[in-house]
Image (spheres, helix red, strand yellow):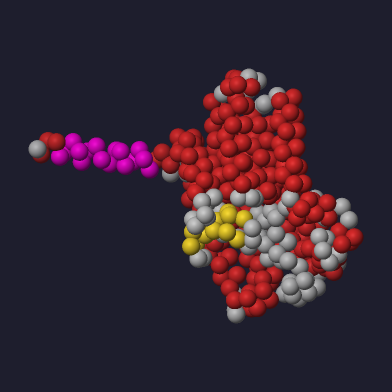
Amino acid sequence: MSAVTGRLRAFAPRRATEVVTGWWTSGDTRRTPNFVVIMAAIFLLNAIGLVMVFSASSVLSLDDKGSFWWFFQRQLIWSLIGASAFVVVSRIDYRAWRRRTVPLMLIAVALLIIVLIPGIGIWVDGSRRWLGYGFLRFQPSEVAKFAMVIFCADVLCRRADEVENYRTALRPILIVTALVAGLIMIEPDLASTIVLTGTVGAALLIGGIRLRQLAIVGAAATAIVAAFSLFADFRRARMFSYLDPWADQTGTGYQLTQSLIALGSGGWTGVGLGASRAKWRFLPAAHTDFIFAIIGEETGLLGAGVVIGLVATLAIFGVRTALRAPDRYGMLIAGAVTAWIVGQAVVNLGAVVGVLPVTGVPLPFVSFGGTALVVTMAAGGLMANVARQGR
């Protein structure tokens, strides 16, 4: 008996060490220039978001919740959780996620199905997108974005020699993407669907899929999204209102015209932090999807330029990280996450300034939000881990 016990005691530490070092490796603590810049840009955007969420939401918070601090306090909590997620994921060897691809994808799909069940999924503003209770809510679609990045990178890495073969490389990704995107569309959540499919498209392009095949897939996806947008009256009106929002300033063009008025009022240096007039319930979603309009109004072109500059910095150093990744899997991870974050930012900024239709996409790291902030911070940590191990 003592001999058996001794063997078990000798075996246990080795197993524990293997489990820990499989995820948390000592080699992931280097601070390369790419890592430092990516981390600094993400945390600066998060800090700007905290300040601007407090400013943009103060009036709404006082009117609806009885306290100036209600939205800010929740944003602060989610920011701390997101910062923790960034630190933890940035210390986990990105290669370890490959062994969890299938479980992570199954969990994401299961959550997307569960959220559609009446009585379980939370119905808000015409959509069933949330799970949880009270303050503790999360969106399965955000988890699905993270899972799809891991899945696409894994498939394109394992079948690197067969990327020109539709059956072996492209078809499995399209099947899973269609399933996940279809479930998100049923909620319905067009904005998340656009971001998800855009991220997958970027991964396919980086992975070396033929441009002709990508063109066909892209045309089909665009047609589906366009049909989904045009079938519903309110979506159709929103899609076309950005072409001439002033034609219906009190109707379909109201939100965009108020956004443009806020941006135009800021001038070069802004009206002053906290002095926004648009946040006095003139601009809907001032602390969420249209927070950039408040940034432009209160801090002017200079403050708005800082935000755009930080997003551009993430784009540049995200691409540098992908190009200098230790292996193909790291390249695909860094490239897909960069496309996700920067692409979502471009869609948000484009809607706020009126060059793209309003889709309801939050500005990464800045807009008020829970799941979106935490998952995006975790994705940033994933990209940062690749940067840590790259050149």
Residue 258 at x, y percent in the picture:
81, 66
Q: On the rendered image, what quadrant is the N terminus found in?
A: top left
Dividing the picture into quarters, in which one does residue 8 lie?
Answer: top left
Does residue 116 appear left or right of residue 305 in this picture?
Answer: left
Question: Furthest-left residue in view?
Answer: 1
Q: Name the residue at 50% across, 66% down.
A: 134
Dividing the picture into quarters, in which one does residue 128 lie?
Answer: bottom right
Q: On the rendered image, what quadrant is the C terminus found in?
A: top right
Residue 40 at x, y percent in the picture:
62, 54
How many tags in the picture?
A: 0
Can residue 13 be found in the magenta stretch?
A: yes
Q: Name the residue at 70% across, 70% down.
A: 56
Q: Nearer the viewer, residue 153 or 11?
A: 153
The answer to whether 237 is drawn above or below residue 155 in the figure is below
Q: Nearer the viewer, residue 167 or 146?
A: 167
Residue 225 at x, y percent in the picture:
72, 42
- Would residue 160 be visible to someone looking at this image? no
Does residue 355 appear left or right of residue 51 in this picture?
Answer: right
Q: Nearer the viewer, residue 360 or 265?
A: 360
What range of the chain is rendered magenta?
A: 5-20
